[in-house]
Amino acid sequence: MKTFSVAFFILFVALLLTCYHRTEHFDDAWFAEQSYWLVRDGWVRSELFRGLNGWEDRIYVFHKLFIYAGALVMKLFGFSLPASKLLTTFCALIAGYLIWVYNQRASKKQQLLALILYFGCGAIIRYFSINRPEIMCMLFGLGSYLALDRPNNKPSNVLLAGCLAGLAALTHLNGIIYLVAGAGWLLVKTNWRAVIWFSLFGGLTLSIYGLDALADNQFNAMLDQFVNDPATQSNFKLIDKLYVMLNYHQLFFHSHGEVPLSVLVLLCVLIFRRALSLSQSVPLYLTLLIVAFWLLTKSNFDFYYILFVPWFVLLASQCLTVYLPDSPVWQQRAGTGVLIIYYGFALFSIGKVLEENYTTRYVPAYNNTLAQHMPDRQTKVIAPISFFFGQIENYRIHGLSYYSAKHETASLEEFFRLAAQENAKYVVSDGYKTASYVIPLDVPDRIGTYQLIFRDDMTSIYERQP
């Protein structure tokens, strides 16, 4: 028990240390900008992606609850890079607390092990301080499950579970899997009446998603944005959808972020298969989640793995504390070895994040350095979307990611002609090499009407000449 307590303390403190000067992620600026305009104008739109899908006027298809909550947090703490990450970190901590609460029905050892597995998961470590909605979505899904599977044979709180599952879907449409899994779980465990009430309250909660479009009489615009959103295209072509479904297993084995927990769960299922069954709450719900996401998902990006983590953790912690002690000695020793390896991978994942934080230039400070070479404020600037942080009030920023999406094959001459047509005063290349139009460092000092005014080992700045 003491070993588990010390191991958890070391892991948790190390994880918190990764939050300091956490490296900027592409979505930090993209979602922070949506919250920024919500606070400033009262509705969600984007200047970074002006010209794409009508987003410069109004965005109707977005992660509604996540952006609303992010707007509240950043209105209180400012539209800075650290503030943009607060919401996700807060949600990750609450989810850990809910895992602790759920395992109160078990032993203290199981509670501590579950926390070690959860906070030691590489995917959680990677996205613990990144402005993306998956952790918040997972939190509401976990809350919904806890309202269903209550301790001491208490009846499920169907209405609360439905509302929380609806909030998960309102946070990210992938959260619909919690509505599907919850309904399936209730169908097996209770009766049709519970399924109907759960689905009704979950559906009513999710229906809030379209209220802004209905209020503006722009429901057709919302549908058009959904159909034409670059992120949804894989679900509209049969061949693309089949490809995603055939490669679904890759979701669970992307890298050291997912492999350790996935392998641990697979080993538990294989070794303790006789003790596990779909009549048990966690295996049933997890199976329904996996099947639902397989049917609904448009991609197998690594951050979607987070949606399953709590149930992997609950299943593995139960197997290792309830079933393993009754196993042969060699299996117990093997189990201890596997846990040591898992913990090693957790520390390795934390080390990789700390290394990235240390070796990567901190975006807000670097943006300030670049801005010193761009004295004409309130002018049009084409720059990486990360230039949002610290500079959104100083320039009118059009993101290089827009050009990557709309003009990816354009030559440099064509790109700078487009910049001139936009009357962009400055063009800033993307030194962080995210999803941006690429302006190499070795291009000529003058291209069209633009002259190089700054270049370092990462970034070039071009200024439009009279």
Image (cartoon, grey):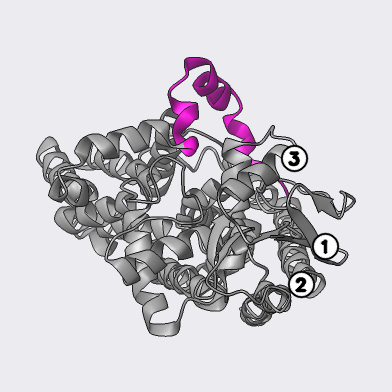
Residue 361 numbered mark, or none: 2
- Crowding at label 3, few (<14), some or many (≥20) Cα neighbours within 10 Å? few
Q: Are marks 2 and 1 in contact (CB under 8 Å)?
A: yes
Q: What residue occupies the far top of the structure in this picture?
A: 239
Q: Helix, strand or loop at disc 2?
A: loop
Q: Is residue 253 left or right of residue 156?
A: right
Mark 2 belongs to which amino acid?
A: Arg
The structure residue drawn at horizontal position 37% and vertical position 62%, both measured from the top left corner, is: 67
Give the Cα distance between marks 3 and 1. 21 Å
User: Which tag, 2 or 1, sits closer to the chain's start?
Assistant: 2
Circle 3 sits on which residue?
413
* x and y, in percent, of residue 23 in the image: 68, 69
User: Which tag, 3 or 1, sits closer to the chain's start?
Assistant: 3
* x and y, in percent, of residue 171 in the image: 35, 55
User: In this rendering, is residue 388 above or below 430?
Assistant: below
Q: Quadrant of the N terminus?
A: bottom right
Of marks 2 and 1, the one in the foreground: 1
